Structures are given as C-alpha cells and as structure tokens.
Image (tube, rainbow, N blue to C red):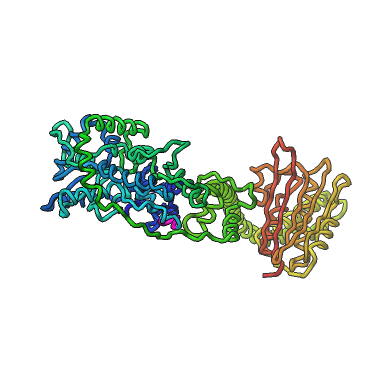
Amino acid sequence: MLVYTIKELCRTCYTCVRECPARAIRIENGQAEVIEDRCIACGNCTKVCSQGAKVYLNTTDRVNKLLSDDTDVAAIVAPSFPAEFSEIGDYRILVGMIRRLGFRYVAEVSFGADLVAQKYKELVDKNEETFITSDCPSIVSYVKYYHPALVGKLAPVVSPMVAMARVVHARYGRDTRIVFIGPCVAKKAESSDVDEALTFAELRDLFADQGIEADDTTPSDFDPPAGGRGAIFPVTRGLLQTADINDDAITGNIIAAEGRIDFQEALKEFEAGLIKNHSMELLCCEGCIMGPGISKNSRQYTRSAHVGIYANQKMRTLDIKAWKAYIEEFKKLDLSIHHRADDHRIHLPEEKDVKEVLIAMGKLTDKDHLDCGACGYETCIEHAAAVKIGLAEEEMCLPYTIETLHRSVKELALSNEKLSSMQLALKQSEKLAHMGQLSAGIAHELNNPLGIVIMYSNILLEESKPDDPVTEDLRLIVEQAGRCKKIVAGLLNFARKSQVDHQLISINDLVTHSIESVIVPENVEVNIDDQTANPDAWIDSEQMIQVVSNLIKNAVDAMPDGGRINILLEDTFSDIIITVGDTGSGINEEDRVKIFEPFFTTKSLGNGTGLGLATTYGIVKMHKGQISVESDTDPEKGPTGTRFKIVLPRRRG
C-alpha cells in the first residue's frame, strides 16, 4: 500500500477527503482510512495533512539493501531536482553526494523526457486523433479507474522515467539495477522497468543517515547520455515546451490542465465531447515541482524559477552534437505502452436512498443544503451519497454535528436539572422520613396521657357549677387539650400510620366537595380545568378532600387582596394529576424546602399549627403518590403564585 494513515495522528479534519481526486478516503469511526484499490497514489493527502497522519511508503531500507548487493545500481534523477536542492549551487555536488551513497551510475531523466517529447511531437504532427498525455502515472491510473471509456485516448508512450530506465539498460546492461529519484509517490509502483523509487525527501534522509554533506563532497557530472530541453519538463506546460509543440491559444490544439480540480474538469468535458480536436496535457499536481515527495521548503513559482535557471544554464553548455548522437542512438528504443481499463467506479445510490440520509441529517429542503464543504465533499448530496455507500459518516456534516451538539447540551442541561431536582427531593424525602419516625414516636407517647387529660378535664367541667370560678379555666383546659389531640392526629397522619380506605370516586367530584368545604371570599375566583379522559380513581375520599381543602385554604390565605385559584385535573393511563395554583405572592426558595416539615408555618403566631402541609404530605405518601411545589418570587417578574402538583396512582397498589 503506497499511501496509508497513522490512525493515532488523525484528527478527523476531512482535509484529505476534500483533496483526494479519486474519493479514495473512507471515514470510519471518525478515522480517515485510505482505500487501496481506489487510490491513484497522487499523494495529495500527504501534502495537506497538517498532523502527519497521511504518509507514503518509505523505501529507503529497500534501496539500502539494493546498494549493499554485489551489483551495479544506477540512480536516475528526475528533472525537478533543482526545485528541491536549490541550496546546492552546483548540481555536480548533488551528483557526487548521490554517488557516495553507493550508486555506480547517476543519470538524468531529462534525456528520457527528450525521447518521450519526440514521441508526442510525432503524435501531434500526425494529427490523426486527439490524445491524453500519459507521462503522469496518477493521471493514467485515474483515467483507467474512473474514466475507462477514455483509456483508448491515453497516449501509447511511456513516461520519461521508464524511457530513461530503458536507456540505462540499453547502455549499461540489463543487469544494472535502477532506482528512480524524484518528487512523485506514484512512481514507486509505476513500472517494473525500475527496481525501486525514492522521493527527494527520502534522499535527504539517506544523506542525513550516512552523514553525507555538500561541503565535503567532490563534484561529479551526470553519466551520459545528458539531457537537453527535457530539463524543463517538470514545470507547467513543460512537455509542450520540451517537444516544441505549438501551444498557442489561437493556433495550438493542446489543452494543458494541472492540479486535482482542473484535470478532473478537463476529463469530464473531454469525455462529454465538449472538447473537440484538442489533445490534453494533464498533470495531477501543479507541475512535478509540487509533487508530494518534495520537501516543503519553498513555493511553486520559486521552484519553477530554480528549474528554469538550471535548464537555461544547461542549454548554454550542452554539447548539442553529442546530444543529437544519443538521440539518434536511442530513437528506435521501444517506448510504447498499451493501457487497459480497470473500472473502479462505484455505482451511486438511488435518489430516494440519498434523500433518506439527507432527512436524517435534518436537510429537509433545498435551503438546508448549505454545500459548505466542511465534510470534504462539494455538495450535501455528494456527502449523503458517500454516507449511503459507506465512504462517509453523517457526523462529518458540520452544521448537523453542531445542531446535534446543541441538542445534546440542552438535553444534558435538562438531565442535570432533573438530577439536581431528584437529589433535592431525595434529600428532603430522607429528612421527612426521619422526622416522620420521630413524630410517630412522639405522638405514640403523648396519645395515652393526653387521652387521660381530655377525659378528666371534661368530667371536671361537667361537674363544675356555672358560677364556679374554675369553670372557665376547665373550659380552657378542655379546648387546648382538644387542640393537642388534633396536633397528635396530624403527627400520626404525617408519619403515615393511618389506614387508607380506597373507594372508586371521580376526582372532579372530589375537588367540587373540597371547594364546598372551604369558605372562599368573594374576591377570590376558583376555576376548574378538567382535562381528564377518565376521572375515576381508587382513593380515600375523606382524606383526599382534606388534602385538596388544605391546599385551597393555603391559596386563599396567600391572596388577602383577592386573586384566582386554578385547579387543573389531568390523567394518564396509570395516574391522576391534581394541580392547585394561585396568583398570590409566592413562597421564597428558602421556605420551599421546609414547607412539608411539621410545625413549620409562614403564618403569624396563633394562626396556624404548621401541620396542614405536613398532613397533606403524609396522606399523599399513604396513597403512594407524589407531591411537589413550584413558586416564583422574582420581584422583576412580579408575583406568579404557587402551584402544588399531586400525582396519585389510579389503582390501589
């Protein structure tokens, strides 16, 4: 596999998806994986990955092993080398450094480019039919894989690398092993004519590993045959200039396109028949000087300038006579190649399947198709299709992911709020449970002596004469003892020691009876909103009337200047719900956590025992129900009143 992912470095930025012309990147569980049989080895992903997660196959160890064998090894150097090694003023120093690695021969691929350019010149001069240049192996693979109908248009000419390899074999023997050195990753698997391929970056690594530096290297020239105009081959329209083909915009019939976007568009238009009577010079990169195997040490036009300077100098010093002799010697060399289609196209899903994915991502209308490209695909439809065929994931859509995140944050906030409420309720429940146990013990201990006090005080009151001075004292004792009896009864109710007499009743009737048992002032309006589908439930009528009456009394007391009491009746399949709300002044937060505690009251001294809501709480719990309170005392909002909500099981359990 020429290009692969270091998964622990991948940050799921989708840049590689965007930059891959072959759509050979699959996102799975947030990781960008290279699909081997779709990859054209252009290396774009390795150039754009800022995290170094995309890398190409390193062949330095294999080259070292080749050099250690007892055989002659030739290095053939791509003409783009001046763009990489611009810091070495004399190219002969670079040649000397390469020889020090163990290479027997060091030759220029630019001579192979000269031979290839002549073949293209012959194709153009014949003017029989249009063609697509085949010197870029990534372009050749792309046409074979994704435009198989155009394979017949690929020029039947090998690349300059293969041409030079055949020259070396012809001149230095078939046993000579060959290593290509250049800017291209795809060269590593282009042809069996070459034994191994190194990128310029890998060559630098070899120099560093063996301590080879320019300052202590003896200059050496390239082995013949020397290249000519082929030195300009790696720059924009370099093939046309090398072959001296007319590329005039008016009279020429060659269209040049380079880079992942332009070459794809050119092929689409060519296949669609929109480009007629024109051949195409295509490069996957913006010239070979921008290949993935070049170090990131300079910019495109600076690199192009370095190549131009070297080519200019070369043409001034070139031995034209010797060059022509070599051209004549090798012009009959077989530089032909037959291209075969290898269809790797994926059938796109049906429109309805794509629409399902779009709907799942919240893209219900055309306006929802932002086509922002954050996912690496140009349109939302392309992304949805990729999701359907397993190349992409829905989470790659940035707007969808942000909306999902916002929804998750809201749900988490709601869950935290519910959790806090449940924790507070549990804490309050535990507190009330302890108080209930204490109350039950107190009530039990007081009940018997209180009964004796009540009985004998009543006997004494009956036996006393009306005009006896102690009669009023006895009447006060009887009255206060009776009050104590009610308090003890309230404590017992709070402690849930009473029995529940379940009866099937209508909660609508229950609320009506509860209202009738309370004196409601004229300035207080009572509304009942019955939203129940089935108002019947098994509850203790007498006890629940006491509960609702208590809540109505408290609501009346909270609105001394008048107001409105709203009673909402609701139900579910298993529960009935009674909500009693008022428009009073509300209950502050500090008091809300204590309102169900026995003897706690906000009323003035002598106007309440503090057992009304405690008793209410106990009765509701005896029914295995829940009671909660909501209230708002925010001065900016004004009084919004208090709402008590009771949830009771419909059936006795």
**Going 80% across and 47% down the picture, which residue do you hit?**
556
Quarter holding residue 102? top left
**Going 18% across and 34% down the picture, which residue do you hit?**
92
Q: Residue furthest left?
A: 70
Quarter holding residue 501? bottom right
Q: Is residue 312 above or below residue 445?
A: above
Region in magenta: 144-148
Q: Position of residue 449 (x, y in %)?
A: 68, 60
**Going 35% across and 44% down the picture, which residue do you hit?**
121
Q: Nearer the viewer, residue 316 or 138?
A: 316
The answer to whether residue 300 is left or right of residue 319 is right
* Residue 605 visible here: no
Q: Nearer the viewer, residue 17 or 441?
A: 17
Q: Nearer the viewer, residue 370 or 506?
A: 370
The answer to whether residue 401 is left or right of residue 104 is right
Report how many numbered discs are placed on residues in the image.
0
Q: Nearer the viewer, residue 565 or 404?
A: 404
Q: Residue furthest right?
A: 522
Q: Position of residue 323 (x, y in %)?
A: 22, 39
Q: Is residue 200 above or below residue 186?
A: above
The quarter of the picture where the C terminus appears is bottom right
Q: Main secondary structure of the magenta part?
A: helix
Is 141 inside the magenta-drawn segment? no
Q: Position of residue 242 (x, y in %)?
A: 32, 39
The answer to whether residue 222 is left or right of residue 251 is left
Q: Position of residue 600 (x, y in %)?
A: 67, 48
The answer to whether residue 418 is left or right of residue 452 is left
